[in-house]
Each structure stands twice: as C-alpha cells, then as structure tokens.
Image (cartoon, grey):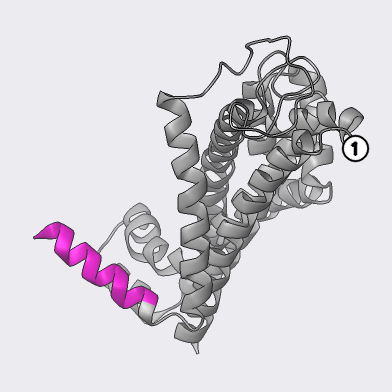
Amino acid sequence: MEKTSFRQRFKTYVSHLPHPGYFRAGLVITAIVLFVIIVGIFYMPYGPTELSPDRLQDPSLLHLMGTDKMGRDVFSRVMYGSRVTLLVAMGTMIIGAGCGILIGALTGFYGGALDEVVMRIMDALFAFPNVLLALVLVSLFGSGTFRVMWALGIAFIPSFARVVRSEYIRCKHMDYVKNARLQGVGNLRVIFVHILPNVKGVLLSNLLIGFNNAVLAEAGLSFLGIGSQPPYASLGQMIAEGQEVFFRVPSCVLGPGIVIVLMVLGFSLMGEGIRTASGTLEE
C-alpha cells in the first residue's frame, strides 16, 4: 500500500512540473548511468587493472571501447571509474551539503553576532573557486580518493550555507513559524521540523547542481593526477592518460568523457525541472 501511495505521489509531482519532459529525460539518463555502475559492481568483462598484450585496440566485440596503451579494457575501466566518480561526488555532497545546511540554518535562524562571524568566513571561502580551494586543501591533506572527497566537501560548504541561510531568513518570519513558537515549540524543532521541509524545493535543486559541480571537480582533479592513483581508474585520470593516443584510439577519451557528460546532463535536466517547479509553486 505504501509503495502504491509513493508511486502515485511521484507521478502527481512529475505531472505538475512545468517541464516534465526535462525531468523525465534526466531521470532516464541518470538511470542508465546508474545501471552501468551497478552492473559493474557485480560483473565486468575484465579487471580494471588487468593487463594484456592487445594494446591500443579499436572497439570490438571483445573490447567494447577498445584497449588503452597498457592493454587494459577501456569499458571495464569506465565502469569502475564511474563508480569512483559517483562515490566521490556523493561523499562531497554529504559533507558539503550536510555541514552547509547546518551552518546556514543556524546562522539564518539566530542571526546576530554568530551570523556575522560565520558568514564572513563563508564569504572568504566562497571567494575562491571550488577546485582552487580543493587544490589548496589537497596540498595540505595529500592526494588520494578519500582526501579529494573531503577537500571537495569542505570547498562546497560555503555555497550551501549561503543558500540555506537566505531561505531561513525568508521563512523565519512567516506565520507558521510564529504559530509554532506561540505553541511553545523549541527552536531546534522549529529549525529542522518546521522550516527545513519548506525549503526542500530550492535545496533539492541546489543539491543536483552541486552534484554536477562535484562530478566535474573530481574529474578535473583526477585529470591533474590528484585523485584516484594508478593503476586504479577514475574518469578524469582516464582522459588524461588517453589524450596521448586520442587520434589513434579515440574511445580511450570518448568513453569516460561521454559518461561524465551523461552524469552531468541527467542531473542538470532533473534539477531544471525541480527548479522551475519550485519557482512556479512560489508564484
């Protein structure tokens, strides 16, 4: 019964989107990418680090995306690298959005000296591009997949904090908040139970945009050799390795590049549908 109810609510929500086609197209694209990643957890044609004498082979039935300069199967490495990129992007969102929501909610609700001090720090961090700030943090923490995830997560905190803070400043003077306070509801309950659900539209849209930025940032750092280290694969690292042989075996670059584009495109389309829906509901 609960599953049917959820399905009906989901269909109703999608049908009321101003551009439901965008949302559905993004959902399909994202589902395809996730399907490939999930299949890669249980089965890959070859090991991502498995070497063979068949170097720089064109795509064929044996190697769907060909092989790289070390004889490794590009398709298998794309399946593995997509998983790494997805996990880093999700970890970045958990750290960045989690801390950003908490900081933005508290500063926006309480205001005062706490708001001034914390937001000036957030503004100073926000002045740096995410990738540049992550590079500084990586230089302090060291390279590697999990260190990059933490560095990107910290770099993404200011953007979420600013968005959530502005929404809390807008919502905290509304009637439903005043009624809750008159009923003796505590501040923490007002912050997380009454206000937070009412900013979910803006927040969800920013989460999807932030996820896209995290995918691109992780790919960029891996391209520079800071993320996942050889012989393990990541999409950005594969592009960096494949650029040397691009004109001989284009699939070495096109394979991971297309997956990055599909990841970003899928979440961008869903985010656009949710953003326009939120804007329409507010009007």
Viewer-nearest residue: 104 or 17: 17
User: As shown in the figure, which amino acid type bears the numbered disc 1?
Assistant: Phe
Q: Is residue 108 above or below residue 180?
A: above
Label 1: how many residues lie within 10 Å, few (<14), some (14-19) or many (20+)? few
- Is residue 246 rendered to the left or right of residue 145? right
Taking the view exactly as shown, the residue that stands out farthest to the bottom is 283
Taking the view exactly as shown, the residue that stands out farthest to the left is 1
Q: Is residue 21 above or below residue 163?
A: below
Q: Tell me, yes or no, whether the highlighted magenta stretch contains residue 2.
A: yes
Measuring from the top left, give residue 261's x and y in whole percent: 68, 51
- Is residue 123 rendered to the left or right of residue 156? right
Q: What residue is shown at x 45% (from left), y 52% (from top)?
A: 31
Q: Is residue 229 above or below residue 75?
A: above
Question: Majority secondary structure of the magenta segment?
Answer: helix
Q: Tell me, yes or no, whether the highlighted magenta stretch contains residue 229.
A: no
Viewer-nearest residue: 141 or 143: 143
Q: Is residue 254 above or below residue 181?
A: above
Residue 49 appears in the picture as rendered = yes
Residue under pointer 1 = 247
Q: Secondary structure at mark 1?
A: loop
Measuring from the top left, give residue 51's x and y in whole percent: 68, 10
Q: Quadrant of residue 13?
A: bottom left
State the quadrant of the N terminus: bottom left
Q: Quadrant of residue 5?
A: bottom left
Viewer-nearest residue: 69 or 226: 69
Measuring from the top left, give residue 96's x and y in whole percent: 59, 42
Taking the view exactly as shown, the residue that stands out farthest to the front is 61
- Is residue 241 rendered to the left or right of residue 233? right
Measuring from the top left, give residue 25's x and y in whole percent: 51, 67
Q: Number of callouts in the render?
A: 1
Residue 109 appears in the picture as rendered = no
Magenta stretch, residue numbers = 1-14
